[in-house]
Image (tube, rainbow, N blue to C red):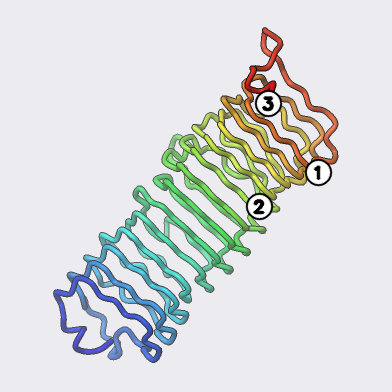
Amino acid sequence: MPAGIAKLKSLRTLCFEHMDEWQDWIPCRVECEEFPCLRELSISNCPKLEGKFPHHLPSLEKLSIHACEQLVVLIPSHSVIQVLEIVECKEVVHGSVKVEKLLIEDCKELTSLCEDGLMSFVTLEIEITSCQSLVNIKLKSTLRTLTIEDCNALESLQFVMDECEEFPCLRELSIPKCPKLEGKFPHHLLSLEKLSIYACKQLVVSIPSHSMLQVLKIVGCKEVLHGSVKVEKLIIKNCEKLTSLCEDELMSFVTLEIEIKSCQSLVNIKLKSTLRTLTIEDCNALESLQFVMDECEAFPSSFIDE
């Protein structure tokens, strides 16, 4: 870092871009509280910057680091940081910090993201993308929005529950393209409104019970286990071991649209009379489609036109 910048103790915003030969944040290797007033820091396209990123930034609110392939990011401890973006860096070292939004993308040597070692999450949105060495994720119960995408080595996703064994704040969960993620997906997600799972071939999805779920999309997963939940829209595609979809076991449908495609082991479907829109496509083994009537033994007029 240029010596002149290091002397600006009252600096609040700092941006470095396209510094191809920059190698050390602190050339003299002296640890100090360089920027006590710094609020925003952005570092992008500094391919030779290496070592550990300094963590003595007590006033930092937004940190963005992009395309610094040799840099190990040490998340600032005990800061007031709100937004943290780490893209194409070497690794993320765990600290203790509260953040509102965390974005980690293409960190090649990141193997674990465990909240007990990483940070305390407060009203937090997390997005993790293309971290190909990431094996384990463990999160606590204040999380609201979670996206995990294209993490080919990910095997374990754990939610650390509180005493009531619920995950009370999570509203949206999306997991595309994590082919090694396995086991039964946790169903204690009572506040969940939107769940999307794509191309997780080893994952058994246990539909959250008694939740506020509105949209449920399950594409390219191993199996779907039945729960009891009201949803507005259900999409299930390419679930190779799903053999039965019976509403009395699966869920209560309220003003629901259902789309089922390319489930080649699906043999039986049984639905109740609150359904409004139904699409079934490319299910070669399907033998039985039953509609469980109510007392008037008829489906509503909105369904008759289908």
Disc ID at residue 264: 1
Position of 252 relative to 296 (above/below): below
Per the model, the C-alpha gap separating discs 3 and 1 is 19 Å
**Residue that label 2 marks:** 182
Residue 155 image offset from top left, x and y in percent: 62, 58
**Quarter of the rendering occupied by the C terminus:** top right
Residue behind mark 3: 247
Kind of residue at disc 2 = Glu
Image location of residue 193, percent across then percent down: 49, 38
Q: Considering the numbered disc 3 on the image, is that residue within a helix, a strand or a loop?
A: helix
User: Does 49 sit above or below residue 277?
Assistant: below
Q: Give the mark toward the camera: 2 or 3.
A: 3
Residue 73 vs residue 14: left or right?
right
Which quadrant is home to the N terminus? bottom left
In terms of image quadrants, where is residue 153?
bottom right
- Out of 41 and 134, give the one closest to the viewer: 41
The residue lying toward the viewer, choosing from 254 and 304, is 304
The crowding category of the residue bearing disc 1, from other C-alpha atoms within 10 Å (few below 14, some 14 to 19, many at least 20), is some
Q: At x 76% / y 43%, what residue is drawn?
A: 263
Name the residue at 73% across, 45% down. Answer: 239
Q: Amino acid at mark 1?
A: Gln
Residue 195, located in which quarter of the rendered image? top right
- Label 1 secondary element: loop
Q: Outermost residue, left direction?
A: 10
**Pointers 1 and 2 in contact (CB under 8 A)?**
no
Q: CA distance from mark 2 to mark 3?
A: 25 Å
